[in-house]
Image (cartoon, helix red, strand yellow):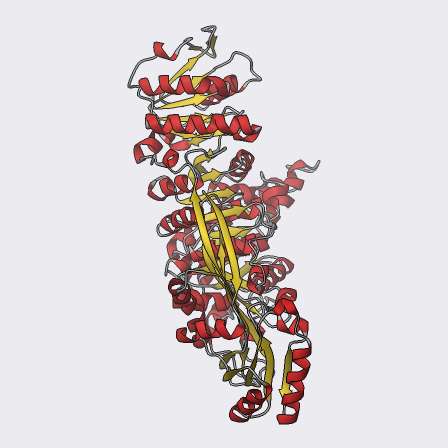
């Protein structure tokens, strides 16, 4: 946490280019001149036509002011251009000069730039450039340093790929040359840490695909970083602290209450009814017996060395004295649900700082304050002030918002995809989301981490935590406050394009984390990582019993542009034609055309998933038969007229689809995702309920399944499992 002060100076275009030339930036042939006669001589040397423009330390965007003359074709026009440009000079421009450069021909313009973000440090940007850079607003960012592979990935992420590829008869942009320019920005900033922002705009692509830079702008400044409360944050929690938090031998609820509407009652109740296996203690000034627990009036009455975790439901004013008593009992960690701290104003902020200082001096971990609680299903621990308690599983949640912890636990209950750990960071005085991510990285119970973040306190620390966990397991991030304006350099196009959301997205992608945009997408993605193997490629087959769903899902895959809806090979087509009626779709999506009334679907699922040209399958249509069975079962004709038999058959078929998908997925080690709207419209339908019972996740739509599969592939590519 620091205060940043910067005094900026803008370098002239000529000085900016001189600084960049040693790092291999391919600038056009150019000369700086002081007089019109020098301009004419330079133009003759370079060869007409030329570009003539004004340069100066106080001149930033020349085009907007009309300080550029293009296609100057002879000496007379060169002298006229100089006169015209000098007439536009103002006293604010200071000392100016002329730049004379070759007239570069090309119909595509890019921007490469750097900003110095206050949270993540230097970020390099690539986007569609020129005078319409901000209007087109297509830019990709990454933190420095940047590897060649990172640079190539940035190029792939530019939305307007048609401009990067073959364009109006021109060759594709030279990706190697562009990647070299991008990766060289790290060397530039290492050699010149005084840089605050940098624009190379435009970077023009010639018809042969080669690149040439025709303009540059650099802002420099002196930064002063004042560290705040560094000594108070010197305490580093150990694995033993986190083990006490998530796997305690015994707990104590401090401030237990017999009033069912108070946190002191609810937290004790939730721990007891969800069968925490360890010891449960509680304090209450009246020594009441609450829910069968005999409370004590003072912590000193409790045994020493037996309790690992304290849960505070007491007023903020009493917590410091209680924390000291906890330390005397050997309690390693505390979750402080109490409010009245930083969120309540200046006095609360002082109280929180004092609490933090005390906890650090005692060597205790404190989660919160102003938090919702902690869940740990391996320990049957539900120590929080709200419901629900989720099924056990492999998703671990750390959130800056307690409400989103509840949201994810609700989705877990609804879907059957379970939770390992879940915690709300509250005010995160001592331990923050990145601390929990570091713990999840080494936690055997955690298969995938899921986090909600609003504020990035220490970008470098968060980035390191993201990289640490993604090296061994996936991380899904939902970011709040995504639309706020980011750090903007005073005059740079790059700074204007670098919103908080884009900077954060660039940081997460560099770390291999999956950034999502909604709570539904967040849980979909985490559930996918928890229940599916990573794909070995991006070639997808859509298998459906109803054509329209397949078409819509194929459209979603195409729009996203990450996965490939693969063309079916001749041998696969032959195998499918032998099983399906002549009217089948004969393409991908594979429409089974009524095969659901026979055993065809399960056979086809195995054939498709087992084929070497297929990396993953999305299956659509489960539950349709059980929907009809439900109507038959509830109608007045049931169980006569043969309905009992057909109802049982329909429900059994949907169950077979679900469990066959699971078996085939394990057999071929490939993801098979099942989607139906019945997952939310009728969760008890045999289709979605069988998917849950098989241990998989049932997606509400094919599009959501496709989006989750794309994230699965992106992480597989980051880990080197998929190309």
Q: Is residue 23 visible?
A: yes
Residue at the right extreme, as displayed: 636
User: Where's residue 56, x and y in %?
Assistant: 56, 72
User: Where's residue 288, x and y in %?
Assistant: 47, 7
Quarter of the image for the N terminus: give it: top left
Quarter of the image for the C terminus: give it: bottom left
User: Where's residue 104, x and y in %?
Assistant: 56, 84
Q: Residue at x 53, y 89 (%)?
A: 42
The total of numbered circles placed on residues is: 0
Judge by depth and name the residue closer to the eye, 705 or 338.
338
Judge by depth and name the residue closer to the eye, 695 or 205.
205
Judge by depth and name the residue closer to the eye, 570 or 527.
527
Q: Is residue 420 above or below residue 657?
A: above
Q: Residue at x 41, y 17 (%)?
A: 322
Q: Residue at x 63, y 79 (%)?
A: 68
Q: Is residue 277 above or below residue 32?
A: above
Q: Is residue 258 above or below residue 101?
A: above
94 with respect to 376 (left or right) = right
User: Where's residue 518, x and y in %?
Assistant: 58, 47
Q: Is residue 529 above or below residue 146?
A: above
Q: Is residue 565 visible?
A: no
């Amino acid at each position: 946490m620091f205060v940043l002060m910067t005094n900026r100076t803008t370098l002239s275009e000529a000085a900016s280019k001189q600084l960049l030339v040693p790092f291999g930036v391919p600038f056009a042939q150019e000369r700086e001149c002081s007089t019109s006669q020098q301009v004419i001589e330079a133009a003759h040397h370079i060869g007409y036509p030329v570009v003539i423009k004004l340069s100066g330390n106080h001149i930033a965007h020349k085009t907007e002011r009309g300080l550029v003359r293009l296609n100057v074709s002879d000496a007379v026009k060169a002298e006229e251009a100089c006169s015209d440009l000098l007439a536009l000079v103002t006293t604010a421009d200071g000392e100016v000069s002329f730049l004379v450069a070759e007239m570069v021909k090309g119909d595509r313009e890019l921007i490469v730039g750097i900003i110095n973000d206050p949270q993540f440090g230097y970020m390099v940007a690539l986007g569609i450039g020129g005078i319409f850079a901000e209007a087109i607003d297509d830019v990709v960012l990454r933190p420095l340093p940047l590897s060649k592979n990172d640079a190539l990935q940035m190029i792939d992420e530019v939305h307007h790929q048609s401009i990067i590829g073959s364009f109006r008869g021109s060759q594709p942009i030279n990706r190697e040359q562009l990647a070299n320019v991008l990766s060289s920005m790290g060397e530039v900033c290492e050699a010149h840490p005084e840089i605050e922002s940098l624009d190379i705009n435009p970077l023009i692509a010639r018809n042969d695909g080669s690149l040439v830079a025709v303009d540059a702008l650099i802002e420099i400044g002196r930064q002063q970083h004042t560290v705040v409360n560094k000594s108070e944050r010197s305490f580093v929690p150990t694995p033993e602290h986190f083990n006490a938090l998530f796997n305690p031998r015994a707990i104590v609820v401090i401030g237990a209450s017999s009033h069912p509407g108070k946190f002191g009652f609810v937290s004790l109740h939730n721990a007891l009814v969800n069968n925490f296996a360890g010891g449960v203690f509680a304090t209450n000034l009246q020594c009441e017996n609450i829910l069968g627990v005999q409370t004590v009036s003072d912590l000193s009455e409790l045994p020493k060395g037996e309790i690992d975790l304290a849960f505070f439901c007491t007023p903020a004013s009493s917590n410091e004295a209680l924390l000291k008593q906890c330390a005397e009992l050997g309690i390693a960690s505390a979750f402080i649900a109490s409010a009245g701290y930083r969120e309540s104003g200046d006095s609360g902020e002082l109280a929180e700082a004092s609490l933090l200082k005390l906890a650090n001096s005692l060597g205790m971990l404190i989660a919160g304050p102003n938090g919702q609680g902690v869940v740990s299903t391996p320990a049957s621990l539900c120590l929080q002030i709200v419901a629900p308690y989720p099924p056990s599983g492999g998703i671990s949640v750390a959130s800056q918002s307690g409400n989103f912890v509840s949201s994810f636990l609700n989705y877990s209950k609804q879907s059957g995809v379970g939770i390992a750990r879940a915690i709300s960071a509250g005010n995160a005085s001592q331990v923050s989301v990145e601390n929990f991510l570091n713990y999840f990285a080494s936690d055997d119970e955690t298969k995938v981490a899921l986090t909600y973040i609003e504020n990035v306190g220490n970008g470098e620390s968060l980035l390191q935590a993201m990289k640490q966990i993604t090296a061994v397991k996936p991380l899904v991030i939902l970011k709040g406050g995504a639309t706020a304006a980011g750090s903007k350099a005073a005059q740079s196009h790059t700074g204007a394009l670098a919103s908080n959301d884009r900077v954060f997205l660039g940081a997460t992608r560099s770390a291999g984390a999956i950034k999502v945009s909604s709570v539904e997408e967040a849980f979909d993605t985490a559930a996918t990582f928890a229940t599916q193997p990573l794909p070995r490629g991006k070639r997808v087959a859509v298998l459906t019993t109803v054509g329209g769903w397949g078409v819509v899902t194929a459209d979603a895959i195409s729009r996203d542009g990450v996965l490939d809806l693969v063309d079916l090979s001749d041998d696969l087509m032959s195998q499918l034609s032998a099983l399906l009626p002549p009217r089948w779709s004969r393409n991908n999506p594979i429409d089974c055309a009524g095969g659901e009334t026979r055993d065809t679907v399960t056979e086809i699922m195995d054939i498709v998933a087992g084929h070497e040209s297929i990396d993953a399958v999305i299956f659509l249509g489960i539950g349709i038969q059980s929907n009809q069975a439900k109507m038959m079962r509830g109608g007045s004709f049931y169980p006569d007229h043969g309905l009992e038999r057909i109802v049982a058959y329909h429900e059994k078929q949907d169950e077979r689809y679900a469990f066959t998908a699971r078996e085939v997925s394990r057999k071929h080690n490939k993801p098979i995702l099942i989607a139906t709207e019945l997952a939310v419209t009728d969760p008890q339908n045999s289709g979605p309920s069988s998917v849950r019972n098989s241990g998989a996740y049932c997606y509400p739509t094919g599009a959501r399944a496709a989006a989750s599969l794309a994230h699965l592939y992106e992480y597989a590519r980051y880990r080197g499992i998929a190309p």
